Each structure stands twice: as C-alpha cells, then as structure tokens.
Image (cartoon, rainbow, N blue to C red):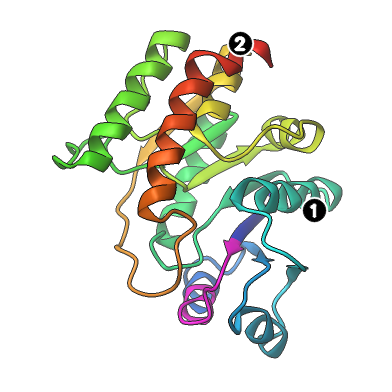
Amino acid sequence: MKLLAIIPAYNEQDCIVETIRELDRVAPDVDILVINDGSTDGTGDLCRREGYNFLDLPVNVGLSSGFQAGMKYADRQGYDCAIQFDADGQHRPEYIKPLLEAMEQSGADIVIGSRFVTKKKDVSARMAGSALISFLIRLTTGKRLSDPTSGMRMYNRRAMAEFVKRYDFGPEPDTLANLIRKGFKVVEVQVEMRERETGESYLSFSKSIMYMARAFVSILIVQWLR
C-alpha cells in the first residue's frame, strides 16, 4: 500500500522538524507531504532548509482547505491511502502500521486512531462536546464512534476521491457522518496521543466553541442537504 502522511502545519516551527524526524525514523516507508498553511513564523523556511516535500500556501486557508489540497496531491500522485498526521507531535507514528493493517483486514474506507476504544473519556468540557458529537453521529447514522474528533484518520482511495470532488468536505466529524450515511465503512483503532507542547493550534478556545457549534448544526441539519 502506497501511503502518504499529510501534515497540516500552521506556525509549527518549534516542532515540525522533530515530528518529521520521528516519522522518518519510526515509519520510513511512509511518504510525507507538509501543508504549510500560510504560516507567519519560520515553518516555511524550515521546510525549504530541510528539503521537505511540502505545499507552500501563500495565505492561511484553514485546516479543511489545506487538508483538501493534500488529498488532491495524494490522488494525483496515485497513493493508495493517506493519513492525516499532526505537525505538533501529538500523533505517534508507531500507530500508523496498526491503522493500515486494520484498513487492509477490515476493508474499511476510513480508519480512525481513537483514544477511547478501550479507555474512558476524561471528565471535561471538551470531552463532553466529543461525547455529544458521538451521540449525534449515532443518532443520524446508527454508527457508534468513540472518538469522532480525533485528527488521526486514514483514508483509502475511495474516501480520498470524495475530498477531491467535494469542495465542502473537510477532516471533520460531520464529514464522517455524511460518508457513513453513504455507505462508507469506518472503523477505530486504539491509540495513545501526546499533549501539545509547542506551536499554534488551529483551534483556540473561542474557535473550539464555534467548532462544536458548527459540528452540531452540520450533523443534525446540513449533512442531509449535501
């Protein structure tokens, strides 16, 4: 299986190099594409200096559009599957192989690296939001997902094609719900993740609130109109 790791990066100069070094060391057979999403720090300069394969977006377009650019690249370059992989070091590359094995063995279109297959969620506002999204996805699709907000997701060519042809698709829970309703098979694999130590997250506190609100509306209403 020819696999591409798509790494969206916005102001990740403090962690992008170590993230890619670890990925190269632990999963050397995985190709890498960094999406430098209009960073205002030295992320782009580091990508050039280190000789990374990267797309240098001139302005910040956000996670969804940046990830779509990566999926279009993967599709045009003939990759069998692609995995979304965080630039900040939260995702651990040793779990890429189990996700790929799960895809091959189960015939899944999407495999989610889940923190909560065998472990319980913490008690927090963020986990409460995640639990509500899980409930809404189950309500609208019949599918139980324990970690729908996980950013570590692997897609096969069938799923990749949806991101290529649809302008309104992003790596978000409402997209998962929409694809499940269309018959795409989604499975989860237990993984462990680290906490972010440096860099700038796509989601600030205020953006996190808006993210949850949009997810609720999209899963309950918008996905039926797609």
From the image, tell me which residue sits under label 2. 224
Question: Which residue does the numbered mark 1 point to in the structure image?
Answer: 73
CA neighbours of label 2 inside 10 A, class few (<14), some (14 to 19), many (20+):
few
Q: Which amino acid does label 1 sit on?
A: Tyr
Report the front residue among 31 and 166. 166
Which circle's residue, 1 or 2, is located before the other in the chain? 1
Q: Magenta segment: does it hold 13?
A: yes
- Does the magenta portion include 12? yes
* Residue sitting at the far right: 76
Q: Along the horizontal axis of the image, is 205 left or right of 215?
A: left
Q: Quick check: can you spot residue 183?
A: no
Q: Where 226 falls versus 168 (above or below)?
A: above
Query: In front: 65, or 47?
Result: 65
Residue 42, above or below 144: below
Query: Residue 158's image quarter?
Result: top right
Q: Give the range drawn in magenta.
A: 8-20
Query: Looking at the picture, which amino acid does disc 2 mark?
Result: Trp
Quadrant of the image for the C terminus? Answer: top right
Left or right for 69, reference 208: right
Whole-percent x, y for residue 92 in the image: 40, 61
Residue sitting farthest toward the bottom: 49
Query: In this view of the protein, can residue 201 be seen by the observer?
Result: yes
Circles 1 and 2, Cβ within 8 Å, touching? The answer is no
Q: What element carries label 1?
A: helix
Q: Residue 41 carries which label?
A: none
The front one of 69 and 102 is: 69
